[in-house]
Amino acid sequence: EAEGAPKPKSSLENSKAYQGKQESAISRLTNIIEMSLEDEWDDVEVEMYSLGKVRDASQFYTCFGVHAREKITERKLCDFVAKGAMHKTFLRHLRNDGMGIDYNQIHFRFHELLRVHELENR
């Protein structure tokens, strides 16, 4: 923050200016990430907020045990992430440009029936 510059308003302070926009914003986001497939939704600035063209949401969801339409994840997903097993499993699959994981190299699907401690020992 620059010296003497006014402090930016918080989201709560700006909320009146955007009243009524929350519902369409949530709809846009859930459609972009394929958690909802509404026939009509506000696609303003969809390119700005999209997932890009390198990977699609279904690759991510399949890999990490996310059931987007049902809005649930596999129960042990947090253990897989928190204990570092995910990092160890996917680190070697980073894209050459450093922009995330190359899902085309991964033949992995997280499922709660897998034992997290077995993954940690890889």
Image (cartoon, rainbow, N blue to C red):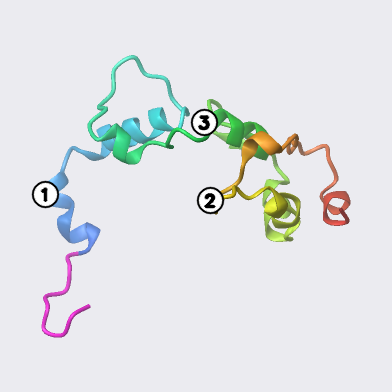
Between circles 1 and 2, the one closer to the viewer is 2
Q: Earlier in the sequence, mark 3 or mark 2?
A: 3
- Identify the main secondary structure in magenta: loop
Q: Earlier in the sequence, mark 1 or mark 3?
A: 1
The residue wearing badge 3 is 56
- The residue at the point 22 percent across, 58 percent down is 12
Residue 101 on image: x %, y %: 60, 46
The residue wearing badge 2 is 97
**Residue 9 visible here:** yes
The residue wearing badge 1 is 17
Label 1 sits on what residue type? Ala
- The residue at the point 75 percent across, 34 percent down is 107
Where are the magenta residues, as a range? 1-9
Which image quarter holds the N terminus?
A: bottom left
Q: CA separation, marks 3 and 2?
A: 18 Å
- The residue at the point 70 percent across, 42 percent down is 75
Contact flag, marks 1 and 3 (Cβ < 8 Å): no
Residue farthest to the front? 96
Residue farthest to the top? 39
**Residue 65 visible here:** no
Contact flag, marks 1 and 2 (Cβ < 8 Å): no
* Relative to 7, 34 lies left or right: right
* Secondary structure at numbered mark 2: loop
Contact flag, marks 3 and 2 (Cβ < 8 Å): no
Label 3 sits on what residue type? Asp
Instruction: Name the quadrant containing residue 19.
Output: top left
